[in-house]
Image (spheres, grey):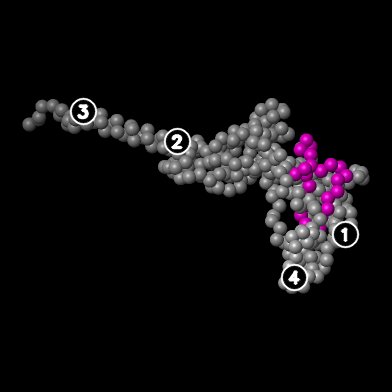
Amino acid sequence: MLAAGTRIGGATALALLLMTAPAPSAFAAQAADPPAPLSDGDQLTARPGERLTFTAPPHLPGWIGDWVMSKVFVQHGTLRMHHPAITAVATVACDTPPGVYPVERAMPEPEGGPADGDGGAPWVTVKVVDIDGVERAACPGKVAALPPEEVEEQWPADDSWPQSPWDVRTFQPGAKVTPTSTLMGYDERLTSRGFTGRPVMRGTKAVLTATATIRCDAELGLYEVRWVGKDEVWARYRVAQIDDATRASCRDGTWHLATGRTPWLVGGAAAALAAAGAYALARRRRGPARPADSGPSQV
């Protein structure tokens, strides 16, 4: 150890910095944009408590939603689209001994568990390095301070919506949107508290679409879409913040925020007022009504 106050040269300082720097790992590679995809058999290096990013080849969109699993993870990761990459994140448990551990990919079952593996070679491996007692003691706090996983996905803007339940697009109040399905839903209705009604899915056997309108009074936030009669969330979207002038001019076919009345009520009231005005004008032109002629008086 160097004594307090000892001065060292630039070359010596650089050498010490390189000696004490942690080994390169997948966590540092997260800054790459986009991250380099992993190939079968690749190995990542990590420290206990470190969050790893696993990147799948972009030409394998069928992997989206699959779990990335290893016994050293605090929790499995889920492959999600973060255009232009497909990524999953998982954190190495603090009590992991040093060693090399396999990482597998599996499709989740409807009941929530992973499908059985095929017994083949793992997708990739993780080499967990050893750490000293001080770093291991600080590890739980480090893990607790990690930000929540980003579950919202980013898909190309020209792809139909939704590509997955977490394919979150942003719409303005009053906008007309086109939910699209390629698997199910002919003649079935969708429901969302941000829609003006319950649009019906129609189309060919291959592609079904509906036209939905975002309510003018929908506030900023995340909204869910379900098939009528089903609890599972089918899609999600976000309603954008708009200014007061834009909201006042919004039209969604059912509600006018400037008047607080539905269009048919506004139109009906206007028609009634017009009829009343026409009746009053006609009476003014005719003049006051005269009493009926009672004929010659009788004495």
Can you give x and y, in whole percent of width and height, for residue 196 in the image? 55, 39
Name the secondary structure under disc 2.
helix
Tell me the distance, in whole angstroms, between the alpha carbons under discs 4 and 3.
112 Å
Provide the residue designation for mark 3.
Answer: 286
Name the secondary structure under disc 1.
loop
Residue type, label 2: Trp
Q: Nearer the viewer, residue 95 or 254?
A: 95
- For label 2, count other residues whose C-alpha is less than 10 Å away and answer few (under 14), some (14-19) or many (20+): few
Tell me the distance, in whole angstroms, between the alpha carbons under discs 1 and 2.
71 Å
- Which numbered marker is on residue 240? none
Q: Is residue 52 magenta?
A: yes
Residue type, label 4: Thr
Provide the residue designation for mark 1.
Answer: 98
Residue located at (33% from left, 32% from top): 275
Residue type, label 1: Pro
Residue type, label 3: Arg
Tell me the distance, in whole angstroms, between the alpha carbons under discs 3 and 2.
33 Å
Can you give x and y, in whole percent of width and height, for residue 100 in the image? 89, 54
Q: Nearer the viewer, mark 4 or mark 1?
A: 4
Q: Which residues are magenta?
A: 35-60
